Amino acid sequence: MTNETRTRRKFIGGAAAASAGALGFPMIAKAQGPISMRWQSTWPAKDIFHEYAVDFAKKVNDMTGGDLKIEVLPAGAVVPAFNLLDAVSKGTLDGGHGVLVYHYGKNSALALWGSGPAFGMDANMLLAWHKYGGGRALLDKLYKSVGANVQSFVYGPMATQPLGWFKKPIAKSADMKGLKFRTVGIAIDVFTAMGVAVNALPGGEIIPAMDRGLIDGAEFNNASSDRVLGFPDVSKVCMLQSFHQNAEQFEIMFNKAKYDALPAKMKAIIENAVEAASADMSWKQIDRYSKDYLEMQQKQGVRFYKTPDVVLQDQLRIYDQVANKKAAENPLFKEIMESQRAFAARTVRWDLDTNANRRMAYNHYFAQKKKA
C-alpha cells in the first residue's frame, strides 16, 4: 500500500468520524425530546382569560415547532389562584398566567400594574410605560425585593373594568356604604375608604358567594368573563366605567431557573410570542366583549348604567389619599408611582390632544338612526 493510499484512507476515515460527530449532536438532542412545561392560570377553565393563557401557550408551542410544549391548567388544578407566584417561584409549577394585582399581599406596589386610575393612562399606555418608560426594570427590582424567582412578562391590555354588579343602580358613593363587595388590589383600600366591606376573592369564587348572600356586589373584569362566570344569574344591574381598575394587563410568568436554562433562540421566540399574544388578545376582546355585552342585554335582561361622575370623582380623590399614604410607607411604591406619573404627564396629554372624539362619530352614524 502506497503512502498516497494510506494518506487518502486516513483522510476519509477522519472525515467520516467528523461527519458522525456532527450528525451525532442533533441525534442526541432529538433523543432528549421536547422541553415540557406545566403551567397554571388563575382563571376557571370556562373563562376567556384562561383562553388567553392557552392562546399564548399555543403560539409558543407552534413557533418552536414543538421543541417547547407548554400545558396550561386552570385555576386550582395545582394551587389556589392567589398562590400562583409562590408556586412558580418555588418550581412547583414551571410557569403561569395571571395578573400582578393578585400578588398584592407581597408588596402593595405590585398593584400599580392594575389598580387605580394610572394618571389617566389606558391599559395600552401603561404597557408602553412598562416597556419604554422603565416599568420592566422596576418590576424586576420589585420582584427581587420579595425574593420571587420568576421571569415576568407583562402583556395584554384590558378594557376599563366596570364599577361592578349590584342589586340596584348606584347613584352616589353613599349608596355603596355598608355593602359587602368583592374587589382586589389597591381597590380594596379605595372601596374600604368609601365605606364598603371588601372581600378579596378569586374569579371562580365570586358567583357562589353572591348566590349565597355572602357578598352584595362584585366586580370582576369584562362582559365575556362576567357572562360566562354567571353574573347575570345573580344580578341584573351592572355599573360601567370606574377608576378602580382603569388600566390593567395580564402577566406571563416562568420559573426563572427554568427560563434561564432555555436556549437563546427559544427565549427570543417567547419574547416575540408575548407581543403577538398581546396584540391578538386586544383584538379578540373587542370582538368577544361587544358580542357578550349585547347578549346580556338582549337575552338575559341585564341593565347597564354609566357610573355617575360624582362617584368617579370620589374614586380619584380617595385613591390619591390611599396612594400617597402607601408611597410614604413604601419607597418602591413611591418610585414606581412617580415613574408612571412622569410618563403619563407626557403621553396622556399627547393622546387627548391627538385623537378625535369617538363618541361624536358614533352618535353621527348610529344615535340618530336609533332615534328615528
Image (spheres, rainbow, N blue to C red):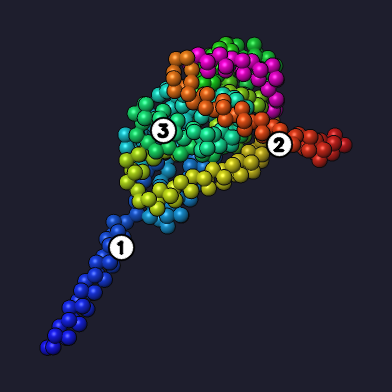
In the foreground, 29 or 236: 29
Quadrant of the image for the C terminus? Answer: top right
Tell me which residue sits at (17%, 86%) in the image. 4
Name the amino acid, label 1. Answer: Pro
In the image, residue 56 above or below residue 65: above
Mark 2 sits on what residue?
A: 354
Identify the secondary structure beneath mark 2: helix
Left or right: 40 in relation to 194: left
Q: Residues within 10 Å of mark 1 (few under 14, many from 20)?
A: few
In the image, residue 157 above or below residue 58: above
Which residue reaches farthest front?
A: 3
From where the camera sits, is residue 338 visible?
yes
Q: Which mark is residue 140?
A: 3
In the foreground, 265 or 258: 265
- Label 1 close to label 2 by CB (< 8 Å): no
Quadrant of the image for the N terminus? Answer: bottom left
In the foreground, 97 or 300: 97
Image x and y of residue 135, in percent: 49, 32
Q: Residues within 10 Å of mark 3 (few under 14, many from 20)?
A: some
Q: Main secondary structure of the magenta part?
A: helix
Identify the secondary structure beneath mark 1: helix
Q: Which mark is residue 90?
A: none
Q: Does label 2 or label 3 sit earlier along the sequence? A: 3
Q: Does label 1 or label 3 sit earlier along the sequence? A: 1
Tell me which residue sits at (60%, 11%) in the image. 177
